[in-house]
């Protein structure tokens, strides 16, 4: 917790006196900060002239709210917290047995994910469930998969990759172009897209092998931008910023199709009513399957020598070399494996959208994926899944919060505050849990008992 | 035939090794051998280039000149200066530890030892592909590697903490773990960079036991850098002494211990005490000349530290490409040599010296002469470098 370090002279003052003084300071700072932001607003009048609208009442309200908030915090909340901390320090550290939910977190999570579309259909009907399965379920799971893929590079191998979205783009365009031009099936192109992304992962890996830390981050960032600019400018192939449309839908291994016109359309095969929801539910289970594949491979790899070498590389590269580990191939496999899952997610994304354009692969996407990995706790699959749920689900749910219009007025659009809330959530989580939701690390092997390794021992890697 | 036999006798042969950083010569023309199955200690004052030698042997530096040959038990020979860094442990079976401990602190002790068996496990897991699908061959190899790790944890007396993170261990235990980790790579030559640094006497004694145990039971030869003389003298079979990147002594611990050059260099003897040292060692010429006063005409001042005088004294500046040598006045071992040479030439000097001069000055003169003679060689170089310096 961030507790203001009070100057020496404040010790003599009572909390209320101090709170009063700090409230005045806070109000003054708020006034100085907001006088131009809130107090004055530029607008146009009927004659298209620029005029200044004065909003002193709103400014006054904000300043007073700040001062009162500071007063309450310093006067009441802070002493109360100190008292609570002192009591906690006095009380013996009770080792609470983790509850049922915590013990079986993974099993419950898997069960909820499997039953989610069924529950949504039961609750809202086929048409009503569309939004919940597609906008929430599939959207979140795509990010879970991307973050799990990036987790291999950033969380395990400790290589800071700011251009991860490039591999997502490679996968998406691989499916979009090969699918539309050659009519190849999703099930052939999924591995192909993964391989292609892995190839580009190695391509990126080679030049950055000797770079570390900030330098690595800059080069990967540039790589992400290069791929996006190539997609925009290579018009003959990618159709530029207009994007590729008419991407074929995924079929159930060619047996059951989701195109209404096809003879083996699912409603005709199963003799049920037509609905777009079948495809969305199918896609949900498809991305869920891909997520499970990613998780399975990640968990398995961590217990294999290559996964241990990744983590060792994050901890100390020089020691790795002294033990005969080829750090070059180890880094390249990390880049390739992470990129491959990005490619899988990309080809799924193209299939789901039916349309791809370079707009979808901007730096912000890389930043969001990286933020999810960091928030979840680097290296932990469960934490990252929760972080994706909070981050992506949280921003999606803002669209649903219509009651906020009643509070803030009819022209309030909560979606516009997504990034603000995103940032606030990150700051809060980083203060509260600097190592992410799950800061500890599961050891990959044990002699007697499996004890989680506290986050204070693990390193973030040097890039 | 004889050469062949001796080739196999030595596990490591360092020949004419030089390492230059820009103009600074960190190691100059160093040659030594380490015998198979022995503990060879590499000692010398701070900055003598011991760790640089280690870094050359283990591939972290590529030497400027010279050859480092490793003869394996199976008769194969590796030229270490040609192998890439990571292949030295993997193919030549040379393992090392670091002066500032480098453990994987966020991984458990067991995991640290499993990472050390990376190459073996990689092959067993079919370069990940077989392992990914859980083939039984990998499972067996994995179980074996855990057994090997347990073996070394027991040897290092750390088996109780096998599942704790390595960063949580106390300092002495971290040192032992690093040695255990190096041993898990199955090395023929184990290079230890100051294994006893920062250990208390009890820990140091248990470290000695561990090293002796490694030597006796695994057949691994050990090369170690150490400052702790109790460790060096107790366990090493052979000692090589470096000063300013050059070898000044080489032999068994007893002979090295009594070598006046070593004592002067390693223990940082003051100029004034050089004679005392020689006396203790039993140099008769010095005993005869005991009444001669100390020579304060040259060399560093009264510093009694391990470091030889102020830096300006020890290293001549040079511009691009020019070799920087340590001036003769700085090397304590060289001083001892100069002194011995001076004393040897004393009778002749006495005759040529002015009769009126008191005895003490007479004795001092040849010493100064000898020193200035050795300095004279450099003096020839100095003006040139001085001119260059002026151009800057």
Image: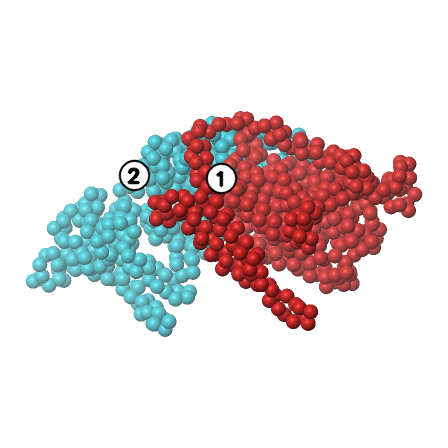
- Residue A190 is situated, as x and y percent measured from the top left of the image, at 76, 46
In-front residue for pair B391/B168 = B168
- Residue A386 is situated, as x and y percent measured from the top left of the image, at 63, 40
Q: Is residue B225 visible?
A: no
- Residue receiving disc 2: B254
Chain (red): A
Callout 2 and callout 1 share a chain: no
- Residue B198 is situated, as x and y percent measured from the top left of the image, at 36, 39
Q: Is residue B28 left or right of residue B345?
A: right
Q: Residues within 10 Å of mark 1 (few under 14, many from 20)?
A: some
Which of the labelled discs sits on residue A457, or is there none? 1
- Residue A2 is situated, as x and y percent measured from the top left of the image, at 47, 45
The answer for which chain carries disc 1 is: A
Q: Residue furthest right?
A: A263
A96 shown above or below B277: above
Q: Circles 2 and 1: CB distance less than 8 Å?
A: no
In-front residue for pair B381/B302 = B302
Who's the residue at 50% across and 56% down the image? A30
The answer for which chain carries disc 2 is: B
Chain (cyan): B
Could you give the CA–CA distance between mark 2 and mark 1, rounded to whole angstroms? 44 Å
Who's the residue at 80% across and 55% down the image? A245
Q: Quadrant of residue B355?
A: bottom left
In-front residue for pair B116/A185 = A185
Q: Residues within 10 Å of mark 2 (few under 14, many from 20)?
A: few
Q: For the residue labelled by badge 1, is the local secondary structure a helix, a strand or a loop?
A: loop
Q: Is residue A371 visible?
A: yes
B105 shown above or below A354: above
Q: For the residue labelled by badge 2, is the local secondary structure a helix, a strand or a loop?
A: helix
């Amino acid at each position: 917790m961030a507790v203001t370090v009070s100057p020496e002279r404040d010790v003599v003052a009572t909390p209320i006196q101090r709170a009063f003084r700090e409230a005045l300071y806070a109000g003054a700072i708020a006034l100085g900060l907001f006088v131009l932001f809130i107090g004055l607003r530029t607008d146009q009048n009927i004659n298209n002239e620029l005029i200044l609208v004065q909003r002193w009442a709103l400014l006054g309200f904000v300043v007073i709210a700040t001062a009162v908030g500071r007063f309450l915090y310093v006067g009441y909340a802070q002493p109360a917290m100190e008292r609570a901390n002192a009591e906690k320090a006095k009380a013996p550290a009770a080792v609470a047995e983790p509850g049922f939910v915590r013990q079986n977190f993974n099993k419950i999570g898997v069960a909820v994910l499997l039953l989610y579309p069924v529950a949504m259909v039961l609750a809202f009907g086929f048409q009503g469930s569309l939004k919940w399965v597609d906008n929430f379920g599939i959207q979140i799971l795509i990010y879970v998969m991307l973050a799990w893929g990036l987790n291999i590079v950033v969380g395990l191998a400790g290589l800071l990759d700011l251009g991860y979205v490039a591999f997502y783009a490679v996968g998406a365009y691989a499916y979009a172009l090969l699918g539309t031009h050659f009519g190849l099936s999703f099930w052939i192109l999924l591995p192909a897209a993964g391989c292609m992304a892995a190839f580009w992962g190695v391509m990126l890996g080679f030049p950055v092998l000797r770079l570390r830390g900030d330098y690595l981050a800059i080069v990967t960032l540039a790589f992400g931008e290069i791929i996006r600019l190539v997609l925009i400018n290579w018009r003959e192939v990618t159709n530029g910023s207009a994007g590729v449309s008419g991407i074929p839908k995924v079929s159930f291994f060619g047996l059951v199709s989701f195109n209404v016109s096809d003879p083996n359309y699912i409603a005709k095969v199963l003799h049920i009513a037509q609905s777009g929801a079948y495809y969305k539910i199918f896609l949900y289970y498809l991305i869920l399957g891909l997520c499970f594949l990613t998780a399975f491979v990640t968990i398995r790899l961590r217990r294999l020598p290559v996964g241990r070498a990744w983590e060792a590389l994050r901890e100390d590269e020089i020691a790795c070399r002294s033990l005969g580990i080829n750090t070059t191939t180890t880094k390249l496999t990390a880049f390739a494996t992470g990129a491959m899952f990005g490619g899988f997610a990309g080809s799924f994304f193209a299939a789901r959208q039916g349309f791809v354009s370079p707009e979808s692969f901007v730096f912000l996407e890389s930043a969001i994926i990286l933020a999810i990995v960091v928030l979840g706790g680097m290296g932990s699959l469960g934490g990252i899944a929760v972080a994706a749920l909070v981050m992506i689900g949280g921003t999606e749910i803002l669209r649903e919060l219509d009651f906020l219009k009643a509070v803030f007025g009819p022209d309030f659009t909560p979606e516009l505050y997504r990034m603000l809330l995103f940032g606030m959530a990150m700051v809060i989580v980083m203060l509260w849990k600097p190592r992410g939701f799950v800061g500890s690390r599961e050891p990959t092997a044990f002699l007697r008992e499996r004890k989680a390794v506290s986050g204070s021992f693990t390193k973030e890697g040097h890039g | 035939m004889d050469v062949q036999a001796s080739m196999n006798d030595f596990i490591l042969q360092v020949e004419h090794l030089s390492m230059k950083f820009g103009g600074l010569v960190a190691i100059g023309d160093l040659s030594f051998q380490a015998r198979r199955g022995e503990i060879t200690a590499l000692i010398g004052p701070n900055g003598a280039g011991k760790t640089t030698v280690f870094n050359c042997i283990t591939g972290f530096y590529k030497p400027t000149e010279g050859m480092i040959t490793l003869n394996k038990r199976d008769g194969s020979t590796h030229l270490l200066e040609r192998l890439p860094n990571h292949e030295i442990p993997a193919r030549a079976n040379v393992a090392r530890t670091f002066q500032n401990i480098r453990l994987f602190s966020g991984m458990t002790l067991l995991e640290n030892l499993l990472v050390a068996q990376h190459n073996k496990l990689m092959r067993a897991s079919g370069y990940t592909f077989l392992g990914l699908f859980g083939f039984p061959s990998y499972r067996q190899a994995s179980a074996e590697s855990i057994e090997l790790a347990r073996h070394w944890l027991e040897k290092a007396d750390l088996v109780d903490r096998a599942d704790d993170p390595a960063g949580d261990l106390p300092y002495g235990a971290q040192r032992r773990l690093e040695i255990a980790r190096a041993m898990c790579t199955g090395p023929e030559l184990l290079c230890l960079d100051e294994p006893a640094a920062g250990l208390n006497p009890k820990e140091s004694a248990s470290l000695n036991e561990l090293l002796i145990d490694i030597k006796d039971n695994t057949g691994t030869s050990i090369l170690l850098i150490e400052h702790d003389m109790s460790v060096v003298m107790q366990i090493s079979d052979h000692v090589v002494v470096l000063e300013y990147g050059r070898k000044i002594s080489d032999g068994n611990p007893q002979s090295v211990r009594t070598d006046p050059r070593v004592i002067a260099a390693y223990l940082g003897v003051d100029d004034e005490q050089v004679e005392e040292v020689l006396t203790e060692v039993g140099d008769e010429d010095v005993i005869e000349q005991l009444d001669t006063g100390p020579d304060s005409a040259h060399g560093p001042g009264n510093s009694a530290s391990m470091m030889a005088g102020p830096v300006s004294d020890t290293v001549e500046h040079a511009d691009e490409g020019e070799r920087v040598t340590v001036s003769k006045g700085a090397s304590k071992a060289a001083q001892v040599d100069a002194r011995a040479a001076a004393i040897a030439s004393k009778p002749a000097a006495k005759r040529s010296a002015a009769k009126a001069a008191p005895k003490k000055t007479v004795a001092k003169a040849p010493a100064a002469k000898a020193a200035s003679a050795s300095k004279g060689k450099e003096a020839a170089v100095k003006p040139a470098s001085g001119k260059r310096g002026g151009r800057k």
